[in-house]
Image: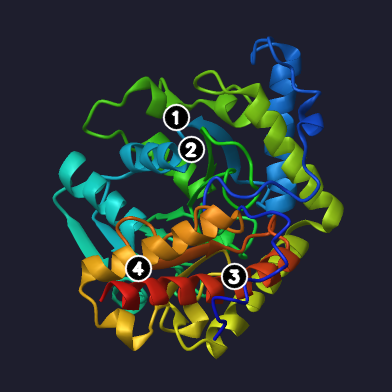
C-alpha cells in the first residue's frame, strides 16, 4: 500500500474518466469542428447532408445491417428508448429485464407511466445479471446490453432466439462502439453518442430492424403520442427521420462532433479497433483490482464485466464495517481527493448504485492515462483511511 509521503509523480495527461459525457477522442480540439454549418438550417442542403453523413458513418462503423433504419432523435438515449417504448409496446405482453438504475427506470416508464397490464419484471441486484433463461421471447423484451451504473453486461446475444415472436428493445448506450452488438437478435437499438465516442450530448440514435418497422405499421398504441415520439404518419413510416430529417432542430455543432468521432474511429480501424481499445483499457484496471486488497469489481461474474463503465467496490474490511452512509462518505472523500489533485474527474459511483468508484474505460480513453491513475487510487485510499482513523 502506498504511504502518504509517496504521492505519485506522474499524472494522467487526460484526467477525464466520466461515464457520460465521456472523454473526447485522442487529439481532439475545437479545430475539428470548424466545418460545422453553424447559423444554417438543418433543413438546408448542407445541414441535411451532414446529418445523412452521420447516419451513413454510424452504419459503417457500427456495422449495422443494410435493412435496418437509423435515425437521429431528440433527448439523448433516454429520448430514443422512450420513443421506442411509447411507439411499440402494448401489442403483446412485455418482459422488463433490469439489473441497475437505467433498466429500472424503463420498468417505471412501462408500469407507472404507460401502465401496461401484462408486464413481467425480471431483476437482479447490482453486480449480477438476472436469470436470462426466465425471459419469454414470445413477448416483447426490454433490456440494457451494458448496465452503465452497475458495470454488468450481457456477454453476448446467445440468450435471444432467432425465431422470437416478440420484439427485443435494447438500450445499448454504454455498449455501442465498444462491445459487439448482435443485430440479428435486436429489433430496436438505442444509444447516445456522448458515451463511447465522447461526442457532445443532446441527441440519441434509434436503430430499427425490419420487424420493428413492421410493428410500427401494423400496430397503433392506445395512448396519444406527442409529436416528438411519432415515427409514423397516415399509417406509413416517416422515412425522413432515417434520412437526416430530424423531428426537431438538432445542434449542428454536436452533429459535427459526432461525425468527427466517427471519422476518427474509421481512421484507427473501425469497430474492431474501438473494441480492442476498450478491452485493453479494461485490462489495465482489471489487473489492478485483481491484485488490490481494497478494491474489487462490482460485477460478480468475470464474463459479465463491462469494458466501458467499470464499477468498483471498496472491500477493505474496515470500510465495509461502516454503515452505508459511512461507506458513501468514504468513497466521496476518495473521489474528492483525486479531483482536487486534478488526476481523475467524475469517477464516483452513480447516485443509486452501491458506494464505490466508476471509471470509464471506453475507446476514447488512453491506456497510459489509466496506468498513470492507478497509483493515485492507492494514494487517495491511504489518505482517506488515515483521515478516518484520525477522526475515530
Q: Which residue is mark 2?
A: 76
| SS at mark 2 in the image | helix
- Mark 3 crowdedness (10 Å alpha carbons): few <14, some 14-19, many ≥20: many
Q: Which residue is mark 4?
A: 330
Q: Nearer the viewer, residue 68 or 248?
A: 248
Identify the mark nearer the N-term, 1 or 2.
Answer: 2
Task: Give the image location of residue 301, x and y in percent.
Answer: 44, 84
State the separation of the CA atoms marked 3 and 2. Answer: 33 Å
State the separation of the CA atoms marked 4 and 3. Answer: 16 Å
Pick the quarter of the image with the N terminus: bottom right
Asked whether the residues under the numbered discs 3 and 2 touch, taking CB atoms below 8 Å apart as contact, a structural biologist would say: no
The structure residue drawn at horizontal position 76% and vertical position 38%, both measured from the top left corner, is 260
Any mark on residue 339, and which? none
| SS at mark 4 in the image | helix
**Residue 240 vertical position relative to residue 370 in the rendered view, above or below:** above
**Residue 392 vertical position relative to residue 238 in the rendered view, above or below:** below
145 lies left or right of 327: right
Pick the quarter of the image with the C terminus: bottom left
| SS at mark 3 in the image | helix
Q: Nearer the viewer, residue 143 or 124?
A: 124
State the separation of the CA atoms marked 3 and 1. Answer: 49 Å
Amino acid at each position: 500500500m502506498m504511504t502518504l509521503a509517496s504521492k505519485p509523480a506522474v499524472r494522467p495527461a487526460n484526467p477525464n474518466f466520466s461515464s457520460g459525457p465521456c472523454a473526447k477522442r485522442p487529439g481532439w480540439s475545437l479545430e475539428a469542428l470548424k466545418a460545422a454549418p453553424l447559423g444554417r438550417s438543418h433543413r438546408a442542403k448542407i445541414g441535411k447532408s451532414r446529418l445523412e453523413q452521420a447516419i451513413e458513418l454510424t452504419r459503417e462503423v457500427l456495422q449495422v445491417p443494410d435493412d435496418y433504419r437509423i435515425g437521429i432523435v431528440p433527448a439523448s438515449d433516454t429520448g430514443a428508448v422512450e420513443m421506442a417504448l411509447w411507439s411499440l409496446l402494448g401489442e403483446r405482453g412485455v418482459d422488463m429485464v433490469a439489473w441497475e438504475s437505467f433498466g429500472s427506470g424503463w420498468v417505471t416508464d412501462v408500469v407507472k407511466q404507460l401502465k401496461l397490464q401484462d408486464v413481467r419484471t425480471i431483476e437482479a441486484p447490482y453486480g449480477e445479471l438476472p436469470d436470462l433463461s426466465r425471459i419469454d421471447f414470445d413477448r416483447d423484451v426490454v433490456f440494457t446490453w451494458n448496465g452503465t451504473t452497475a458495470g454488468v453486461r450481457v456477454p453476448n446475444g446467445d440468450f435471444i432466439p432467432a425465431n422470437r415472436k416478440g420484439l427485443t428493445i435494447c438500450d445499448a448506450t454504454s455498449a455501442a462502439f465498444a462491445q459487439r452488438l448482435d443485430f440479428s437478435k435486436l429489433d430496436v437499438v438505442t444509444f447516445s453518442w456522448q458515451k463511447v465516442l465522447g461526442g457532445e450530448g443532446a441527441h440519441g440514435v434509434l436503430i430499427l430492424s425490419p420487424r420493428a418497422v413492421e410493428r410500427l405499421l401494423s400496430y397503433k398504441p392506445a395512448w396519444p403520442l406527442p409529436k416528438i415520439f411519432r415515427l409514423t404518419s397516415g399509417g406509413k413510416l416517416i422515412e425522413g427521420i432515417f434520412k437526416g430529417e430530424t423531428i426537431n432542430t438538432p445542434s449542428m455543432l454536436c452533429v459535427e462532433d459526432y461525425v468527427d468521432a466517427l471519422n476518427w474511429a474509421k481512421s484507427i480501424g473501425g469497430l474492431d479497433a474501438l473494441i480492442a481499445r476498450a478491452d485493453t483499457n479494461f485490462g489495465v484496471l482489471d489487473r489492478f483490482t485483481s491484485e488490490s486488497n481494497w478494491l474489487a469489481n462490482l460485477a460478480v461474474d468475470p464474463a459479465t464485466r463491462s469494458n466501458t463503465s467499470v464499477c468498483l467496490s471498496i472491500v477493505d474490511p474496515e470500510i465495509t464495517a461502516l454503515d452505508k452512509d459511512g461507506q458513501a462518505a468514504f468513497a466521496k472523500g476518495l473521489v474528492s481527493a483525486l479531483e482536487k489533485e486534478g488526476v481523475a474527474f467524475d469517477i464516483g459511483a452513480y447516485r443509486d448504485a452501491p458506494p464505490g468508484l466508476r471509471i470509464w474505460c471506453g475507446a476514447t480513453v488512453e491506456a497510459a492515462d489509466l496506468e498513470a491513475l492507478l497509483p493515485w487510487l492507492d494514494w487517495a485510499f491511504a489518505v482517506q483511511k488515515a483521515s478516518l482513523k484520525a477522526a475515530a
